[in-house]
Image: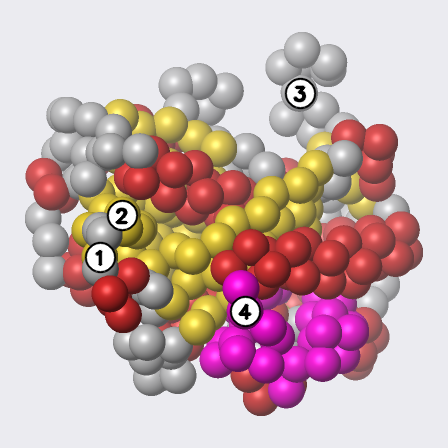
Amino acid sequence: MNTVRSVIKGVGAYLPARVITNEDIAKIVDTSDDWIAARTGIRERHIVADGELTSTMGTHAAKAALADAGLEADDIDLIVLATSTPDQTFPATAVTIQAELGINHGAAFDVQAVCSGFIFALATADNYLKGGQFKRALVIGSEAFSRILDWEDRSTCVLFGDGAAAVVVEAQKLNGAMSDRGILATCLRSDGRYRDKLYVDGGPSSTGTVGYVRMDGPEVFRHAVTKISEVIGDTLDIAGYQVSDIDWFVPHQANKRILDGAARKLGLDPSRVVITVDKHANTSAASIPLALNTACVDGRIKEGDLVLLEAMGGGFTWGALLIRW
């Protein structure tokens, strides 16, 4: 019996050229490299240049993913972009990327689940592909968070960076041993009771302004490890796997203390955790695909590996996704 699975065909990434170190931020607000690194694990982050947009970065990442997959833009019939920093209120930034790639068929739209956005976007594309509505998708995470930061608020401005990454996903009919390939299970959650713990204090219908990121750090941290661990357990149960089966854990790169705490709670070998937060900071919906790209380029993730993704973001939203590479 054939099983339709969404298989990852290629990955690609883009980071802005400008790098801001912790020492650079210490010249702006009252902080230090030691203070930031000890509490977050972050050493530096990339920041968009003037005129560089979420769509600009997303297009670069999409082209890199297509090249890695050995495909042309016309081979894609679905684009799902995860972002909280769209170019405009509307239209969706995904359609700008679609046009930049020269695609005029299929569908393109944005998904907004903040730092969980890439998990939600990939799960969305997976369902469309398995349902037979589309054949190949570009799933992109692209964020220009530096544009919504209050650079006088040291509790948030030290945490975030900009960047984009993408994956090409293809619907394939698999059978026998090969049916255990591609996206095996997804689990998505949200709870709006916590929306005031991590949010932006602006919006078209509330203030008519863009606003800035505001966060209750201790509360976010308190909920993160528990919610992440629970959704990972649910995802593994759906697919019939255990933590010991995981080859690589690619979490949202928010804070190294959260990553370490989740790994300990799950009993995961720290050497199996892909960490890029030191170089990228928190790039929201772009963080997981950026980490995926890093681990693929350096040879850690190989065909046949069991890869677990997870994230938690404002809302709260959280989720996990299991892939046989």
**In the figure, is residue 160 to the left or right of 245?**
right
Specify start and end residues of the magenta stretch as a single range: 240-269
Residue situated furthest front in the rendering: 1
Which of these two is toward me, 153 or 137? 137
Disc 1 designates what residue? 174
Q: How is the image coloured?
A: secondary structure
The percent position of residue 112, horizontal first and vertical second, equals: 55, 33
Which of these two is toward me, 144 or 91? 91
| Residue plotted at (44% across, 73% down) | 306
In this rendering, the answer to whether 24 lies above or below 4 is: below
Which of these two is toward me, 107 or 147? 107
* Tags 3 and 2 touching, CB below 8 Å: no
- The label nearer to you, 3 versus 2, is 2
The percent position of residue 269, horizontal first and vertical second, equals: 63, 87
Q: Residue 323, located in which quarter of the rendered image? A: bottom left
The numbered mark at residue 4 is 2
Circle 4 Cα neighbour tier, 10 Å, few/some/many (<14 / 14–19 / ≥20): some
Disc 3 designates what residue? 203
Mark 1 secondary-structure assignment:
strand
Circle 1 Cα neighbour tier, 10 Å, few/some/many (<14 / 14–19 / ≥20): some
Amino acid residing under circle 1: Leu
Disc 4 designates what residue? 241
Q: CA distance from mark 2 to mark 1?
A: 6 Å
Amino acid residing under circle 3: Gly
Q: Earlier in the sequence, mark 3 or mark 4?
A: 3
| Residue plotted at (52% across, 76% down) | 246
Q: Earlier in the sequence, mark 3 or mark 1?
A: 1
Is residue 194 visible from the viewing direction of this image?
Answer: yes
Q: Earlier in the sequence, mark 3 or mark 2?
A: 2
**In the figure, is residue 90 to the left or right of 100?**
right
Q: Earlier in the sequence, mark 2 or mark 4?
A: 2
